[in-house]
Image (cartoon, rainbow, N blue to C red):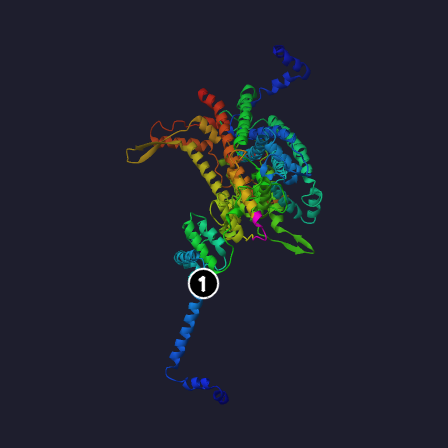
């Protein structure tokens, strides 16, 4: 050790003064200077390179997040507890903009109260605010982006595509959402919601992100054109008038049985009572 | 001979060759009693006729084949899809045959009403005791028709080969496979190989349009023949006894009534077919074993079976390389046949318990057989709970409750519900009997309060009318079976003692708590008492004249009459 000290005189100089009273202060100043210059060297550069509008949006989203979402999802979207050791909201890092756009755009988030399932309701945020929130969450880690409009544009869907979408729908979706997209029950108070009057974008995003009980249908499982075809079939179903009259909710034989008993048998029994009262009773009363 | 002369020429021509005058003379004047509840079976008969008429129309276009075709009809959402000929032809009937959809829907609604009206008819027969001697066999025939009607409906639901019916068949195939030992063989036999195979539509079609309708037609004939032969039952009322039928003749009154009712039934069914969409097979899509839809349910009459399967926890046991699926065996292969057999044999069971071998043409008022009415309510509750179980998913989504909670509630209630229904119904019936006795003995509360000279307040009672008194008392005394002493005077034990003890216990269970109608002396005494109470000319009808029209005897004579063969 002493040999080293002898060979390097500046080191020896420092070494001699390292126990000096102000040495700590000097090191601290050096450190601060280094960090400061490093920050000055990188940070302003980034800000300049970035789209300033987007960073502003993220900033805005972050503020909205802190007010509306952070109480459950944590201040940095890392997920939060409810104070009793249970999760109040999952981590949103990596869920992507599509998930935010779906959850907030369909009004499911912010949730009013925890329950078996968060229901769809009127959105609490404006489209611009939703975009900002999505941008903020997307900035945390990569995840599925909000799909481009042409990917769910069904205005040019051909009959063939719609038929294909129907087959995909029956194979992948009807088991929970019912043959006409009217929804169905899942265990423990959960349910597959009705797909009627849902924005095509939101259906696309739901397939992409798998909200709540729904499995994820990634682009490798259901390719973008498959998703579009499913949406086209759903749209055609919704537009379609029931050719057989009143559709009874398109729920299947349960509602048919209910109508058969209440309306059919009910009506016929009323008529039977009427015919029964017409004959002997009326005459019998006269005879008495 | 004088009547044949009066016939107009065409009728005479027919009469000369077929002798319809004689048949008509005997039967056209046949008297039927009048009551709305006697027309429930007619709904079933008329729906059956509608089913045959619309069914014939449908067979003109339906192709009972599993051959694969590419759909090129006018329903665009399925265009170009590969499907069976059965399904494609159903779509053609729906969208490309003029009036085809209407006919399909009338056919289906008529099927719904057919089974429903048979069931309502059955309930009427049950609660009024119309199944008693001599009509036990007609009950069994009717039950056979109900059973065949359900099978017929289910097979018809399977014919279009759509996703929903295919799922239903798959469940049925699962039930068949669950039969121990023979399950797999049976499944291969019925479907001609692996499910679904290429056979079932053509096989089911023949059964649906030929075999079962033929059987039902034969049973309808026997059923109606027996109705004519036994004569129709009637409710108790003035002038009505076990030996007569009070009502109107077939011609012209019932020709008009029944004929008119046929058109009403046809009209209601046609309206439902025109306005209410049923079985939209185009929405279900063609059957593909890889697909399934939420809310896969059978038509209502199979709903209780669906429910019993849905409620059953998933038990399974394996031994000696055999799997026993209790989760299907119990709810599909044990409970339904047991329940159906119990209901089908009920007339014989009740007869054995009560020992009542007499003929009955006067109907029971349900309250006068509290135990039977209670049993009926228990049956309905049991059936109804299973029925609800079949739709547990829709109940969960529409009432915002948890599917698991619905299922667990029903799992408990399936045991408690029938017991409670039995108890409550029986008590209500007994209370109604008491209230009837009160009316007979004390008359109606007039609402007039009188104060007697010594300060006591009484309410005046007005006696009920003779007609009502007749109606209320036109029933038999019912007594628990008396099986006599353990040993005769020589000390020899009576034969079949153990089984008779069970029988006596059941008989006590049936009758012990029911209220007997008052005897003539009790009535006389009550009315004399009324006189005394009122100090006036109130409670006049000391003797209720209607009573003489019925079996008005003491317990001893009643017992002799019941057990006499």
Mark 1 surroundings: few (<14), some (14-19) or many (≥20) residues within 10 A: few
Quadrant of the image containing the C terminus of chain B: top right
Q: Position of residue B403 (x, y in %)?
A: 51, 49
Compared with A204, B480 (above or below) is above
Residue B253: within the magenta?
A: no
Q: Which residue is mark 1?
A: A46
Q: Position of residue A15 (x, y in %)?
A: 44, 85
Chain of the residue that carries numbered disc 1 in the rendered image:
A
Left or right of A65? Residue B274 is right
Residues rendered magenta in the picture: A218-226
Q: Position of residue A218 (x, y in %)?
A: 56, 53
Task: Give B468 or A96, whichever is nearer the viewer.
Answer: A96
The residue sitting at 39% across, 31% down in the picture is: B444
SS for callout 1: helix
Q: Position of residue B87 (x, y in %)?
A: 63, 37
Task: Give B39 or B166, whichever is nearer the viewer.
Answer: B166
Instruction: Please indicate, yes or no, whether residue B362 appears anywhere in the rendered image.
Output: no
The residue sitting at 64% across, 47% down in the picture is: B174
Task: Give A68 or B444, whichever is nearer the viewer.
Answer: A68
Q: Of helix, strand and loop, which mostly describes the magenta segment?
A: loop
The residue sitting at 45% across, 22% down in the picture is: A285
């Amino acid at each position: 050790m002493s040999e080293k000290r002898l060979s390097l005189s500046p080191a020896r100089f420092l070494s001699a003064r390292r126990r000096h009273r102000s040495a700590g202060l000097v090191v601290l100043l050096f450190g601060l200077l280094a960090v400061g210059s490093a920050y000055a060297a990188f940070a302003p550069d980034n800000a300049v390179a970035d789209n300033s509008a987007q960073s502003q949006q993220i900033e805005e989203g972050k503020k909205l997040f802190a007010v509306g979402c952070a109480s459950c999802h944590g201040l940095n979207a890392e997920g939060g507890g409810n104070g009793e050791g249970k999760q109040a909201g999952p981590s949103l890092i990596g869920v992507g903009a599509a998930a935010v756009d779906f959850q907030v755009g369909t009004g499911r988030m912010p949730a009013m109260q925890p329950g078996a399932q968060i229901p769809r309701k009127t959105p609490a945020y404006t489209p611009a605010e939703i975009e900002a929130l999505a941008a903020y969450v997307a900035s945390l880690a990569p995840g599925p982006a909000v799909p481009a409009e042409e990917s769910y544009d069904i205005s040019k869907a051909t009959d063939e595509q719609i038929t294909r979408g129907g087959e995909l729908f029956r194979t992948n979706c009807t088991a929970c959402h019912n043959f006409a997209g009217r929804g169905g029950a899942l265990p423990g108070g959960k349910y597959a919601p009705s797909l009627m009057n849902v924005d095509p974008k939101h259906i696309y995003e739901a397939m992409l992100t798998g909200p709540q009980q729904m499995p994820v249908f990634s682009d490798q499982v259901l390719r973008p054109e498959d998703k579009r075809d499913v949406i086209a079939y759903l749209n055609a179903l919704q537009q379609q008038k029931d050719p057989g009259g009143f559709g009874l909710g398109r729920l299947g034989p349960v509602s048919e049985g209910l109508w058969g008993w209440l309306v059919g048998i009910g009506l016929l029994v009323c008529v039977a009572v009427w015919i029964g009262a017409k004959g002997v009773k009326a005459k019998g009363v006269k005879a008495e | 001979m004088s009547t044949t002369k009066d016939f107009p020429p065409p009728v005479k021509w027919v009469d000369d060759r077929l002798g319809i005058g004689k048949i008509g003379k005997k039967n056209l004047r046949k008297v039927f009693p009048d009551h709305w509840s006697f027309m429930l079976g007619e709904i079933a008969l008329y729906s059956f006729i509608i089913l045959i008429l619309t069914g014939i129309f449908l067979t003109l276009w339906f192709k009972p084949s599993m051959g694969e075709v590419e759909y090129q009809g006018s329903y665009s959402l399925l265009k170009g899809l590969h499907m069976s000929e059965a399904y494609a032809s159903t779509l053609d009937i729906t969208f490309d045959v003029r009036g085809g959809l209407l006919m399909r829907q009338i056919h289906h609604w008529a099927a719904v009403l057919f089974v429903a009206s048979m069931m309502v008819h059955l309930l009427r027969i049950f609660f009024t005791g119309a199944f008693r001697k001599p009509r036990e066999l007609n009950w069994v025939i009717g039950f056979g028709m109900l059973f065949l009607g359900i099978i017929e409906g289910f097979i018809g639901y399977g014919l279009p080969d759509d996703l929903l019916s295919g799922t239903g068949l798959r469940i049925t195939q699962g039930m068949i496979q669950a039969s121990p030992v023979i399950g797999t063989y049976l499944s291969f036999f019925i479907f001609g190989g692996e499910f679904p195979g290429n056979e079932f539509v053509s096989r089911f079609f023949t059964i649906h349009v030929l075999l079962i309708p033929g059987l039902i037609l034969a049973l309808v004939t026997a059923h109606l023949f027996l109705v004519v032969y036994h004569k129709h039952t009637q409710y108790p009322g003035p002038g009505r006894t076990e030996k007569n039928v009070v009502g109107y003749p077939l011609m012209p009154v019932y020709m008009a009534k029944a004929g008119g009712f046929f058109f009403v039934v046809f009209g209601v069914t046609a309206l439902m077919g025109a306005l209410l969409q049923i079985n939209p097979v185009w929405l279900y899509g063609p059957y593909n074993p890889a697909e399934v839809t939420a809310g896969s349910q059978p038509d209502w009459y199979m709903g209780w079976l669906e429910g019993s399967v849905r409620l059953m926890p998933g038990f399974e046991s394996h031994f000696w390389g055999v799997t026993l699926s209790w989760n299907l065996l119990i709810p599909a292969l044990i409970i339904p046949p047991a329940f159906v057999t119990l209901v089908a044999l009920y007339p014989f069971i009740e007869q054995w318990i009560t020992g009542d071998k007499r003929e009955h043409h006067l109907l029971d008022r349900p309250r006068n057989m509290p135990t039977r009415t209670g049993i009926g309510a228990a049956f309905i509750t049991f059936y109804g709970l299973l029925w609800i179980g079949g739709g547990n998913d829709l109940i969960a989504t529409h009432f915002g409750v948890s599917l698991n909670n619905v299922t667990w509630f029903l799992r408990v209630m399936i045991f408690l519900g029938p017991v409670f229904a039995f108890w409550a119904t029986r008590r209500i019936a007994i209370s109604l009997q008491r209230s009837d006795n009160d009316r007979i003995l004390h008359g109606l509360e007039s609402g007039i309060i009188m104060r007697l000279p010594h300060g006591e307040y009484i309410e005046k009672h007005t006696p009920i009318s003779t007609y009502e008194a007749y109606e209320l008392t036109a029933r038999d005394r019912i007594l628990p079976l008396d099986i006599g002493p353990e040993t005769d005077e020589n000390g020899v034990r009576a034969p079949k003692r153990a089984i008779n003890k069970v029988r006596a216990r059941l008989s006590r269970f049936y009758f012990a708590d029911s209220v007997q109608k008052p005897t003539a002396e009790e009535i006389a005494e009550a009315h004399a008492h009324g006189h005394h109470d009122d100090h006036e000319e109130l409670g006049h009808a000391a003797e209720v004249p209607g009573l003489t029209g019925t079996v008005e005897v003491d317990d001893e004579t009643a017992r002799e009459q019941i057990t006499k063969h």
